[in-house]
Image (cartoon, coloured by chain):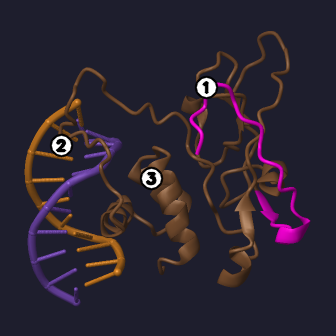
Chain colours: A brown, B purple, C orange
Amino acid sequence: MAWTDERIAQLKAGWEGGMTASQIAEQLGEGVTRNAVIGKAHRLGLEARPSPVKGSEDPGVVAPPAAVAAPPVAPPPNSPPAAVAATLAPRPIVAKKPVRTGKAARTTLLDLNEKICKWPLGHPGDADFHFCGKASQAGFPYCTEHCLLAYQAQLPRRDRDRRPPPQMPGMPRR
DNA sequence: CCCTGATTCGC
DNA sequence: GCGAATCAGG
């Protein structure tokens, strides 16, 4: 399998999002080993990720918590040509108001696997942060519902809402 | 043994 | 450029 732009983007997203090499490899599809992912990551110049063996300095503040598997930039099911893929963008994740359901079982980071929708609900760190948890679409990190949310064609620029997004208090401005 | 990332080196 | 084999630590 070749390293298409889409797959490279997926690799970067996962790598920078804190996914491990094998998780990324799994997500990229069968026949992709973690070695391939690591090798490619290095060739891409990505790096500087805490390796268990190469001790990161500052043992006190150990890990970039790597909270959530970053919503990956994955190719849509009907594998579009590069030109079309360029018009696809992940939709910003809008945190939903947590639904108060008492003690319903929630999908945590530890429950995730390739068969589970990893759409995040709420904010990492919040007590009620969890994942969608429904069955994911084969080959995709999300269920059908969230795939539809995640992979949307971009509107033409002139039709797009140009208002700046609301700024979270305390968030660094770009 | 399971995992992790890093590195090497033949292809 | 690619990635299996290997290394080395957790």
Element type where label 2 sits in the image: loop
Which numbered marker is on residue A54? Answer: 2
Of the two numbered discs 1 and 2 on the same chain, state the one appearing first in sequence.
Answer: 2
CA gap between label 1 and label 2 equals: 34 Å
Contact between marks 3 and 1 (CB within 8 A): the answer is no
Of the two numbered discs 2 and 3 on the same chain, state the one appearing first in sequence.
Answer: 3
Residue A50 in view, yes or no: yes
Q: Quadrant of residue A76?
A: bottom right
The residue that mark 3 highlights is: A15
Q: Which residue occupies 72% across, 50% down?
A: A142
User: Is-magenta flag for residue A52?
Assistant: no
Of the two numbered discs 3 and 1 on the same chain, state the one appearing first in sequence.
Answer: 3
Q: Position of residue A126 (x, y in %)?
A: 64, 19
In the rendered view, would you say A62 is above or below C6?
A: above
In the rendered view, would you say A56 is above or below C3?
A: above
Q: Position of residue C8 (x, y in %)?
A: 9, 45
**What is the magenta range?**
A151-174
